[in-house]
Image: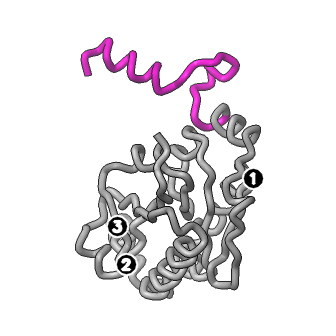
Amino acid sequence: KKKNYITFLDQGFDDNFDYAIRSYKNSKFDINDYWYKMNKLFTKLKSTFPKDKIIIAAHPRRSEKNLKRYTMQKAKFDLTAQLVSQSKLVVTHYSQAINLAVLFNKPIILINFKSFDLHTFERSQSIMNFSRLLNLKVLNIDKDYKLEKKSIYKIDKTKYETYKNLYLRFAENYNKNINIWNEITKKLNEKNI
């Protein structure tokens, strides 16, 4: 059931254990600037879509207390698949949870910052790859940008299906109309897992 909300897929950049153990502490990436710009985006989304709520699908390793330091947006934990399935729109950077939006055929907005490259070069490149593979618009929120209601909800069904076939299905099922998730569930049930 589609609800009146927009889901932001949080990646926990500011509270990321993986980056902490890899000594990314000397990064020039400014988390306060990041959240300032994200909050501006949330405000712009609210004014463009006044009937819709914005909900943050919090990264599973994020602490709730940490998130509240940066934003007043409502956040939900451990409900990403449910939130995405019921959303009207999904906003993300390059989270692998984007796969859920593709599986549920949801429109996606990709968000980029030039300061991402100050932290790790993979960020902007990953965003551009998703843009190319799924024919998605990328908003660079360092610059002035417009949210166009008419084009925001469009998805390229051909690109989504190609992506599902190439990245979200088992190779032996590529030409068969088999739902990978039903097959996985069936196998797990057979093994009583």
Write down the quadrant of residue 184 in the picture.
top left
Around disc 1, counting alpha carbons within 10 Å, would you say few (fewer than 14), some (14 to 19), or many (20 or more)? some
Give the camera-side residue of 27 and 112. 112
- Residue position marked by numbered label 2 in the rendering: 71
Asked whether residue 122 is drawn in magenta, I would say: no
Marks 3 and 2, how far apart at CA: 8 Å
Q: Position of residue 11 (x, y in %)?
A: 43, 64
Amino acid type for the residue under numbered disc 3: Lys
Region in magenta:
166-193
Asked if disc 3 and disc 1 are in contact, CB closer than 8 Å, the reply is no
- Residue position marked by numbered label 3 in the rendering: 74
Q: Position of residue 161 (x, y in %)?
A: 69, 35
Amino acid type for the residue under numbered disc 2: Thr
Up the image or down, 30 lies above or below 55; here it is below
Identity of the residue drawn at 70% across and 76% down: 146
Around disc 2, counting alpha carbons within 10 Å, would you say few (fewer than 14), some (14 to 19), or many (20 or more)? some
Up the image or down, 166 lies above or below 127; here it is above
Amino acid type for the residue under numbered disc 1: Asn
Write down the quadrant of residue 173 in the picture.
top right
Residue 181 located left or right of residue 157: left
Identity of the residue drawn at 46% across and 46% down: 86
Around disc 3, counting alpha carbons within 10 Å, would you say few (fewer than 14), some (14 to 19), or many (20 or more)? few
Q: Which labelled disc corresponds to residue 135?
A: 1
Write down the quadrant of residue 111 in the picture.
bottom right
Q: Earlier in the sequence, mark 3 or mark 1?
A: 3
Q: Earlier in the sequence, mark 1 or mark 2?
A: 2
Helix, strand or loop under label 3: strand
